Amino acid sequence: MKILVIAPTPFFSDRGTHIRILEEAYALEDRGHEITLATYHIGKELPKDLHSKIDVRRIRRLLFWYKKLEAGPDWQKIILDLLLIKKVFFLARTKRPEIIHAHLHEGVLIGWLVQKILFWRNIRLVADFHGSLTKEMVSHAYLKQSMLQKIFRAVEVWIDNMGDVAVASSWDNAEEISAVRKEGQVTVLPDGTRLRMFDGLPDKQTIRETYDVPENKVVVAYTGALIPNKGIKLFLEAIPLLATRYTNVHFVVAGFPVDQITDYIATEVFQNRVTIVSPLPYYDLPKVLRMSDIGVDPKDASVRQASGKTLQYMGAGLPVAVFDTENNREYLAEGGTYAKEATAESLALAIGELVESEELRKSRGEICRKRAEAFSWEHTAELAEGLYQNILNHK
């Protein structure tokens, strides 16, 4: 099939949303489909060693000063999305896709507009929701409790009803959208992990030397965006609690933007017990996880997002400390170590449980690695392909 992917974001950046977009598209291409991807004017080009023919098309650089790569709302994105409408319309006319696969609420709205304008083409629209638009904006402190928030929520519900089929990256989000979507259930199209990324890596000690990480410590790692709605604050607050209790623990915090955590970095415990890796290129992620002993994902369920980092930890065979959410249970099952409450203290207790027992780390890591096999990107692409065939058969 010819598939037009809409990515209303500075693709590619080294964070979860972009990893989902890239890996979905790459796995679909691997199954023989022709992928065109429309995105903003900024972002990394795909690495040559990926050997991909995904056709990345960018909007014009009219906002040449806009260079924001991290997640979060910005009023200038309205202009970028208007330019993206023009780009998607052009590509839909010239590439003649059978499917528009639109990511995020902005992408779904753009895809819906183009689908309606080119109605005689019978292009089918897949709405791929990564989380709650309104709750994410609130989590970034961009919307306060106000009438404006209610307006955004009404717009979000309207967009939730678009698309010939709707998919969500998490079970939490699928449940929320299903409650407001008038036609059709929401299918969970889960995030995945590319297991072969973890093959052929150097040994743990060699990688630790590269990153100047102590050799004989239990290394607890967080990888991903260093922004509030990822729960990073709770992990940073848990670090001093763990450092006081366990002398054999070292921490790795890998991601960007590092300026979001400068107040924590300045403290003595961070100077002595924490290694910062920033930025963390996606293709260096396997090495960081290979040198680690425990993965931590402190995100709660409030923004309805999935967590690709948990799956990456699983693919690397790490035991994972998380909060007890439906999405985490679906991924980890008995392989997870669950904090009972969404607090730094509770998270520290869960991490500490793993720190204290090498046998527990090994057994739960093995469970996680085995479960990761059911969450490959190839499996996600197969599910997407089935959805495409189904809506094309019902033209």
Image (cartoon, rainbow, N blue to C red):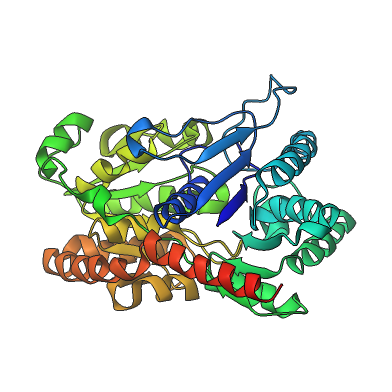
Q: How many marks?
A: 0
Q: Measuring from the top left, give residue 308's x and y in whole percent.
A: 43, 56
Look at 63% across and 61% down and name the residue there.
Answer: 129
Residue placed at 87% from the left, 59% from the top? 151
Q: Is residue 307 left or right of residue 164?
A: left
What is the quadrant of residue 161 in the picture? bottom right
As displayed, is residue 380 above or below residue 174?
Answer: above
Q: 137 or 395, which lies in front?
A: 395
Which residue is at the front of the view, 236 or 130? Answer: 130
Q: Nearer the viewer, residue 188 or 255?
A: 188
- The answer to whether one can see residue 11 in this image is no
| Residue displayed at 51% across by 62% down | 306
Query: Residue 182: image x %, image y %?
Result: 78, 79
Residue closer to the observer: 34 or 337: 34
Res. 395 image quadrant:
bottom right
* Residue sitting at the far top: 65
Q: Position of residue 34 (x, y in %)?
A: 52, 49
Horizontally, residue 109 falls left or right of residue 385, namely right
Q: Residue furthest right?
A: 147
- Residue 271: x, y in percent? 32, 32
**Image quadrant assignment for residue 116:** bottom right
Q: Residue at x 54, y 73 (%)?
A: 171
Is residue 395 visible in the rendered structure shown here?
yes
Q: Is residue 197 above or below residue 210?
A: below
Give the position of the N terminus as an image quadrant.
bottom right
